[in-house]
Amino acid sequence: MGKNLRFLITAALAIAIPLGLVIASPLWLLTACVALLAAWMMLTRVGQQTWSVAQLGISSIPKRLGSSAVIVVGIAGVVGVLVALLAMAAGFEMTLSQTGTDDTAIVMSRGSPSEVQSILDRDAVETIAQASQVIKNDHAQPIASAELVVSAPLPKKSGGLANVEIRGVGERVWELRRNIRITAGRKFNSGLRELLVGKGAQQQFTGVGIGSTVNLNSQPWTVVGIFDSGDAYNSEIWADAGALGSGFRRGSNSTSLVVRLTDVGAFDAFKATLASDPRLKVDVQTTRRYYKQQSEGLSKMIRIVGTIVGVIMAVGAVLGALNTMNAAVSTRAREIATLRAIGFRSVPVIISVLVETMLLAALGGAAGAAIAWAIFDGFTASTAGANISQVVFTFDVSPALLWDGLKWALAIGLIGGLLPALHAARLPITAGLREL
């Protein structure tokens, strides 16, 4: 019993320590470990024995191609799904994090989690816009945009309906958001029911081309242009704030006020100015911080779901690797026993089995990562969040995500190969020699 207990403790440590190192290691450290292993195999007697045994196992892979393919395909599936889901979260977060700047601020009514839950009256908007920290244009007008955000259902190109954000903006929005480019058509005219459609919204919805008529709140609106912002605003449709407020019976109220500050360092003073005015019950953030917060909840949920799915699939891949390598060890029991009988130690046997399994795992991980990159990198999708109606974004399959996927593959190979390796090393020589 004591001997078995020591074996179990040793096996647990042998799995936990290398597994932690594989998952936490940066690329340079893992590369260094592989280089050290190669040097050990070339320069030491035990290492040379290990490489000899490993070559025998690797050379036998074509003879058991079907069972080896189970490991490769299973791990490729785990890595492909995991990388795709994490790329979805990264792309969504990147789209929103690119929206806004540190020298612009968004003001909403106190306690509002997003613009659609906020209400600002006209007096509050005028008071805030006159703050000394708000920069003015050449005509001494504050560069500020009182905005009204509503949502409306539109037919999607893929079928069905989805909510799209309609943003009513002020006259000086073009001075405020200088990254906006009109790619087709023209800007809307103040006071008219005219629409500018974001590039992403145009890709997702039908009937929003230039010259099209869109029914919003049972009223006809004409699309007069397409714009590209390179961020989350691409998912929206813009209109004149006054016309939108009238069309949706919101009067002169706004949902937010966005202002450009004199410089990045003026934010704290601007926030203090608003807090010191008893007439104002508002919260203020930089626009960059606001959109980053909007992405955090959904990004976190996608990552959690992706990790859970990855773990479930990884368990199946580990079991497949265990069965495959156990079968491989069983068929080579006599060979392994013969090697040990002529002087080979247990260490070469253990490491050689691990090398074989990790090689198959690396092939599966590389295949899964390549498939995920080929299919999903730059893939355009849309999602509906709790506070955002429809956001169009692209999957971001970054090198960091591909590396994470490969580490998952190596970790699965390590777990799936270590127990069969330990079993091969503990197999009694006499029992192995009796195998046919």
Image (cartoon, rainbow, N blue to C red):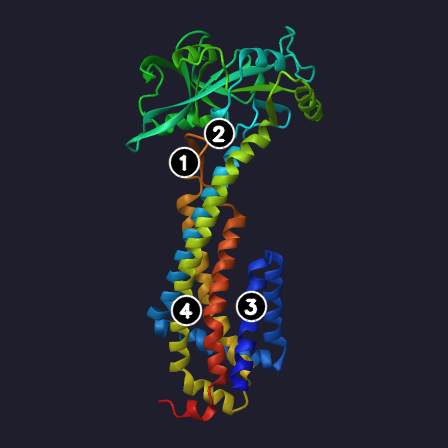
Nearer mark to the viewer, of 2 and 3: 3
Closer to the chain start, of discs 1 and 3, is 3
Mark 2–mark 4 CB contact (< 8 Å): no
**Residue under label 1:** 383
Closer to the chain start, of discs 2 and 4, is 2
Q: Is residue 2 left or right of residue 139?
A: left
**Residue under label 3:** 16
**Residue under label 2:** 232
**Residue under label 4:** 321
Q: Is residue 265 left or right of residue 425?
A: right
| Mark 3 to mark 4 CA distance (whole Å) | 17 Å
Nearer mark to the viewer, of 1 and 4: 1
Q: Tell me which corner region of the image, top left, top right, bottom left or bottom right, holds residue 435.
A: bottom left
| Mark 2 to mark 4 CA distance (whole Å) | 43 Å
Q: Identity of the amino acid at label 4? A: Ala
Where 30 sits versus 390, above or below?
below
Closer to the chain start, of discs 3 and 4, is 3
Q: Identity of the amino acid at label 1? A: Thr
Q: Nearer the viewer, residue 48 or 405?
A: 405
Q: Is residue 54 left or right of residue 197?
A: right
Mark 3–mark 4 CB contact (< 8 Å): no
Q: Nearer the viewer, residue 276 or 319?
A: 276
